[in-house]
Image (cartoon, rainbow, N blue to C red):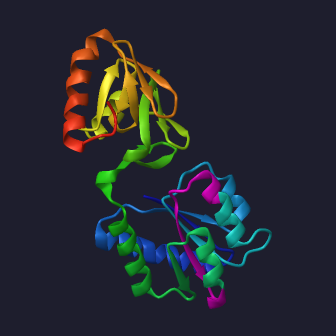
């Protein structure tokens, strides 16, 4: 997993990363940590982080403002504030912080926070994709469809879309077959977001459409019927 440590104190950076490495060895978790001395550098990073450890007071842009901008780009990111100012805890929760840890960081409290983080991540409800750009975590219930674009795949969600350098077949294999089905050589459709369909196309609840290939009609209809029976869906 990729984490970011954003703190203007090098001693603090070193100590926290040392503890993260210790936790990783103890729990068998591969943790890769990047260091940033200010919020501007963190925001310029092209990598997607699963956890950001954020200092509250930094030069230029403070931790709260940095966290707000992170939320605009990645609302799934887990933010843990670390500060010597306990009065900052209330402000930190305005940006959905997962924990607030006081400096110097207590190892046991940090480890408990990480344990709680992993407990909160329900792997069964997430599509986790590792690419050269980082790790993407997408709620499965938010996925409307996935579309092949050459060697890339566009994943359309209820909020936006993500284009990842992964073949559609890899994405298809990661999605639960009782909720998704290949409906065309270029599409995998999510049953939860289907409003209607014909023998040639599927209409989703966001107004978009996907092609329904002739070779896939029988499998699609059978799988969609089973989905409706299993989940008592509001759809057809």
Q: Residue at x 35, y 39 (%)?
A: 192
Residue drawn at point x = 39 percent, y = 25 percent: 196
Q: Is residue 1 left or right of residue 35?
A: left
Question: Quarter of the image holding residue 97?
Answer: bottom right
- Nearer to me, 85 or 33: 85
Q: Is residue 13 left or right of residue 108?
A: right
Determine if residue 167 is in view.
no
Does residue 33 lie above or below 148 as drawn?
below
Nearest the camera: 35 or 216? 216
For the residue pair 130 and 66, the one nearer the viewer reads as 66
Where does the image place residue 110, in percent across and percent down from the top left? 44, 80
The answer, for residue 216, to whether it is visible in the render is yes
Asked if residue 224 lies left or right of residue 31, the reply is: left
The single residue placed furthest to the right in the displayed view is 60
The picture places residue 22, in percent across and down from the top left corner, at 38, 75
- Up the image or down, 40 lies above or below 105; here it is above
Q: Residue at x 64, y 73 (%)?
A: 7
Q: Residue at x 27, y 11 (%)?
A: 215
Residues drawn in magenta: 70-87
Tell me the quarter of the image containing the C terminus: top left
How many labels sit on residues? 0
- Nearest the viewer among 144 and 194 is 194
Q: On the picture, is 10 further left or further right than 130? A: right
- Percent x, y for residue 161? 53, 38
Whether residue 185 is in magenta: the answer is no
Q: Is residue 84 magenta?
A: yes
Q: Against 134, is 18 above or below?
A: below
**In the rendered image of this protein, does residue 74 appear above or below residue 121?**
above
Residue 49 point in image, percent of width and height: 52, 57
Position of the N terminus by quadrant? bottom left
Quarter holding residue 178 = top left
């Amino acid at each position: 997993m990729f984490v970011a440590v954003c703190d203007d104190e090098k001693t603090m950076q070193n100590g926290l990363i040392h503890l993260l490495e210790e936790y990783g060895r103890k729990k068998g978790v591969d943790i890769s940590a990047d260091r940033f001395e200010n919020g501007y550098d963190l925001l310029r990073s092209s990598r997607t982080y699963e956890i950001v450890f954020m200092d509250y007071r930094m030069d230029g842009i403070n931790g709260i403002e940095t966290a707000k901008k992170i939320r605009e780009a990645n609302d799934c990111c887990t933010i843990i504030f670390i500060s010597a100012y306990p009065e900052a805890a209330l402000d930190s929760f305005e940006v959905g912080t997962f924990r607030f840890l006081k400096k110097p960081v207590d190892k046991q409290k940090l480890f408990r926070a990480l344990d709680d983080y992993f407990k909160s991540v329900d792997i069964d409800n997430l599509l986790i994709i590792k690419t050269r750009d980082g790790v993407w975590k997408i709620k499965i219930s938010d996925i409307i469809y996935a579309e092949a674009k050459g060697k890339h795949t566009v994943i359309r969600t209820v909020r936006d879309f993500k284009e990842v350098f992964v073949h559609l077949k890899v994405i298809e294999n990661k999605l639960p077959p009782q909720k998704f089905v290949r409906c065309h050589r270029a599409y995998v459709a999510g049953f939860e977001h289907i409003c209607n369909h014909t023998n040639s196309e599927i209409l989703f609840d966001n107004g978009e459409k996907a092609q329904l290939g002739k070779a896939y009609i029988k499998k699609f209809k059978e799988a969609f019927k089973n989905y409706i029976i299993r989940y008592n869906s509001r759809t057809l």
